[in-house]
Amino acid sequence: MPEWTILAIVAVVIVAVVIMIVRLHVNPVIALAIGAAAIGLMSGLGALGTVETMATGFGDTMAEAGLLIAWGVLIGSLLNRMGAITRLVESLLKLFGPKGVPFAIGVSFATYLQTIFVDVMIVLAAPLARRIAPRLGKAGVGIMAATFAISLETGIALMVPGIGAVMIAASLGIPIGQMLLWGFVVVVPTVIVSILIMTIAFRAGFWNPEGDEQEIIQDGDEPGGADADGRSGADAPRSVSGATRSIPVAGDGAQRSSVAVAEQEDEARRLPLLVLFAPLLLSLVLIAVGALLDIAEAEAPAMQFLGSPAIALLIGVIGTALIARRALGRTELERALVHGFKDAGQIFALTGVGGALAAVIAAGELGDLLTGYLGASAFAPIVLVWVFAAVLHIAVGSVTLSAMTAAGILAPVAASLGLNPILIGLAAGAGALFCIHVTSNTFWLLQSFLGQSVRGALKSVTVGVSVASIVALGMVLLLSVVL
């Protein structure tokens, strides 16, 4: 098949998938599945070959990432139910003070809090962010909004257990432990430098409160605040079901239920914050130790078993569940677990279908064409990977989807470029951050929950995360000197 035909098929299908998602509002899982089937049929795999390749790609990806996603989502759901996020932000404010708290929140959101869904994190932490903002000066709202956007999106794309990072690792065959270690090396300075750049720019006049902020009108308990369920009035997105609970509203049973919930929340608040997060932190430490042993090629069977990501995060789930059982009681524990499994459903499907798309592309000749093009290019392959992912993100509007798609398409090329696959994965994740705009759910959540106008959100979210994307690219280029 001529080269131009292969390129045209993939290009047309990707454009069609983008149109289905953005314009026709087709669910990304269905759109990606249609795209994978179309590429397989039109590239000569045949009907049976296309189905078999898609099934193999789906299975291989889920074998790599399925358990990690399940355990991560469950830990996040349990921490959410215990009010751990709100307490953490309050503690960071007391510890670091107003000027230091954006950096502390940013690093926390981008690293070990990646088990929490972005939607949930924004809803829970937004009321506290609005209280912190006035203490940061006239540009406080912009600084806090940029902090949220930069840290949450950077963590998703580059830091395990962020969904995008897990998908990238699965697509490129990168050990999860190594993705966690090198992702951490890139993420922390990226978040700090990006927040610092945006803070300086906003205080220098880039942020104009009169035009970039707007009054929040909600039905919560406080103006612009969240109600007892962590929802901000009628505007709370339905996707944050894990942040809410169902309590009867009439009769004596309702009073007893409300009292019981209040008592459970009091019990959770009596537990030290470090205790609530200890199982999750232990899991991440075990994964990091396991990765270091792999890099050093050291033999330590017991530690390698405990440090395998699936086992380490399972330990985190068990530990967090035991704490939640004491703090919340059996009923609330079971409810949190049910919410966690429900929320994980679409992530499972998206991850698997992304693997199916990657497998179909790898089975064709596109990998050889990309290898020849990237190898002959005068530009650094890392930069081209970043540009490729950035273009996908501008078109699709989803960090996770564009990072996963870029990694899947580039997977056949990785071994031929003479680069460590971790560099390709991190470059794809960094590029997928570029130019978050109005097709992103995060954009609208931060715009509404933090009291920004659309113009303000374009500054704090679109510009802020684009700055982080460029800084992350620089960090990956520096890392390439070492790896």
Image (tube, rainbow, N blue to C red):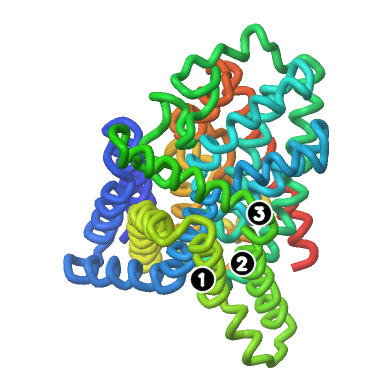
In the rendered view, would you say 288 is above or below 220?
A: below
Q: Are marks 1 and 2 in contact (CB under 8 Å)?
A: yes
- Give SS at disc 3: loop
User: Is the N terminus in the top left, top right, bottom left or bottom right quadrant?
Assistant: bottom left
- Ranked by sequence position, the earlier of labels 1 and 3 is 3
Specify few, some or many for label 2: CA neighbours under 10 Å numbering under 14, 14-19, or 20 or more: many
- Ranked by sequence position, the earlier of labels 2 and 3 is 3
User: Is the C terminus in the top left, top right, bottom left or bottom right quadrant?
Assistant: bottom right
Q: Where is residue 264 in the image (x, y as percent from the top left)?
A: 50, 50
Camera-side residue: 315 or 55? Answer: 315
Per the model, the C-alpha gap separating discs 2 and 3 is 15 Å
Camera-side residue: 234 or 142? Answer: 234
Per the model, the C-alpha gap separating discs 1 and 2 is 8 Å
At label 1, the amino acid type is: Ile
Left or right of 317? Residue 128 is right
Per the model, the C-alpha gap separating discs 1 and 3 is 21 Å
Residue 413 seen in render: no
Q: Position of residue 239 (x, y in %)?
A: 38, 40
- Give SS at disc 1: helix
Residue at image coords 50%, 35%: 442
At label 3, the amino acid type is: Thr
Camera-side residue: 157 or 358? Answer: 157
The residue that label 1 is drawn on is 318
Residue at image coords 33%, 67%: 58
Residue at image coords 38%, 57%: 331
Q: Are marks 2 and 3 in contact (CB under 8 Å)?
A: no
The residue that label 2 is drawn on is 279
In the rendered view, would you say 220 is above or below 151?
A: above
Q: Do the residues labelled 1 and 3 touch (CB within 8 Å)?
A: no
Specify few, some or many for label 3: CA neighbours under 10 Å numbering under 14, 14-19, or 20 or more: many
At label 2, the amino acid type is: Pro
Residue 111: which disc?
A: 3
